[in-house]
Image: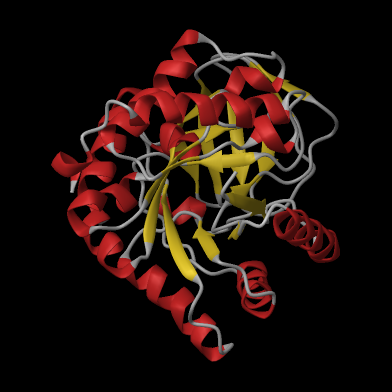
Amino acid sequence: MNVARFNFSHAQYEQTKLLMKTIKTISDKLDKHTGLMLDTKGPEIRTHEFDGVVTIQKDSEVKISMTEVLGNAKLFSVSYSNLYNELKVGDMVNIDDGYLSLEVVGKDEAKQQLVTKAKNTHSIKSRIGVNVPKVNLEMDFISPKDYQDIVFAAQQDFDYIAASFVRRAQDVKDIRKILQEQGNSNIQIISKIENQEGVDNLEEIIQESDGIMVARGDLGIEVDGELVPLYQTRMITKCLEYGKPVVVATQMLESMQRNPRPTKAETSDVFNAVREGTTFTMLSGESASGEYPVEAVTYMKKINYQAEKVVNYQALS
């Protein structure tokens, strides 16, 4: 392992400090440096509370309120109050990593509610993620929480900040300004490309960033799934052109959260990312909460080693 990533969608400051101390102690014992990466929560939309677990049936009408309500199968609310103004009829709203898709079929102006039709049946619960593919939302990039987390990264001398949902070069500049104000401009900013706007502005983002992360989880919800490998190749190629590091992340060895060895498809996925020229491959749930974290790291290392045997690094440079 070369870098330890702290996901600040969930991490707490005191717990993080303890883990950082443990990592440093072990790294010193092994006479190696392990990089520390703070992954920001980023601008996100979530549902508010539901009355327990709610099942939304295919073809049912569901209204999305901009005012907080206790949600049910017919009406729920979201954390971004301007969503009503930014969506139009025909737009899609994906809930719970895309497992529930709602199509906007109307707008109730008096109540400021989006009227949607469920495209499939799915059960949902409180405070789950909401994505709106192919729509460039005007959300503030740095939330109050992200600001405090970036300050924490500067104070604790992290090596990297993985900036979630970077959409344009200005987003990176905004983070760099905070780091400079905190007197720690040495932290490298790895921009996570997670939606179409980020893909469209890829070159300017690479120029402003210290590296790029192909964040395939949210990217695969925000864009059509078959485009993800195409965009991955494009990001790796463009980063190589600029001499910037690139990380391929999310679901690389996903089945190892529950199984002691990866599938052949996962092995090929990791292998091909390295063959294309990625600088890093990354584990998420496999090592954070899975049943076989050590085995996942070991398998990824073995696959990377085999892939590097066939990489023509002169051709990539």
Left or right of 18, for residue 307: left
Left or right of residue 172, residue 293 in this image: right
Give the image location of residue 111, x and y in percent: 60, 50
57 or 8: nearer the eye?
8
Q: In which quarter of the image is the N terminus?
A: top right
The percent position of residue 249, horizontal first and vertical second, equals 48, 38
Residue 245, percent from left and from top: 35, 54
Residue 146: x percent and y percent? 61, 67
Q: Residue furthest top?
A: 264
294 or 100: nearer the eye?
294
- Which residue is rendered at x = 55% and y = 83% of the image? 184
Residue drawn at the location 73% of the way across and 24% of the way down: 292
> Relative to residue 54, is residue 1 depicted above or below?
below
Q: Residue at x 76, y 53 (%)?
A: 26
Q: Decide if residue 312 is on the left or right side of residue 61.
A: left
Query: In which quarter of the view is residue 208 placed?
Result: bottom left
